[in-house]
Amino acid sequence: MNFGIQEFPGFSEPLQEVFPGCPVVRDGAMWPSDSPGLGVDLDERAAAKHPFPVGKLGGGWTEVRRWDGSVVRP
């Protein structure tokens, strides 16, 4: 066993749609995909339907970081 307790919020339906092959929680354990490689894929069409929110009204990491990666105070 790698650890006794792990906090995991799960994957939302949009995340599961964008990243088919996400691990699933079943019977109290997290099960990885049995697909080759990391088992997670990217569905670019689904990603286009769920754009990342930008700015203070939309939330997201851009509130504390600029696109160039520099840190700013919100």
Image (cartoon, rainbow, N blue to C red):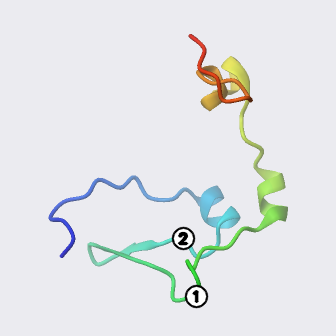
- Indicate left or right for 29 with 19 as reference: left
Amino acid identity at mark 2: Cys
Which residue appears at 45% of the width and 79% of the height?
A: 32
Q: Residue at x 69, y 27 (%)?
A: 58
Q: Examine the rendered structure and indicate whether residue 45 appears above or below residue 37.
A: above
In percent of width and height, residue 11 lies at 51, 59
Q: Is 2 above or below relative to 11?
A: below
**Nearer the N terminus, badge 2 or badge 1?**
2
Residue 5: give x, y in percent of width and height. 18, 60
Name the residue furthest top.
73
Q: Up-down: is 22 above or below 46?
A: below
Which quarter shows the N terminus? bottom left
Q: Residues within 10 Å of mark 1 (few under 14, many from 20)?
A: few
Outermost residue toward the left in this view: 4
Q: Nearer the viewer, residue 46 or 69?
A: 69
Which residue position holds label 2?
A: 22
Give the left or right position of residue 55, taking residue 30 as reference: right
Of 10 and 69, the residue lying toward us: 69
Looking at the image, is mark 2 or mark 1 nearer the viewer?
A: 1
Say which residue appears at 51% left-offset and 82% top-offset. Answer: 33
Residue 40, percent across and down? 60, 74
Q: Position of residue 73 (x, y in %)?
A: 56, 10
Count of numbered marks: 2
The answer to which quarter of the image holds residue 24 is: bottom left
Front residue of 68 and 5 = 68
Left or right: where 58 falls relative to 29: right
Q: Which mark is residue 35?
A: 1
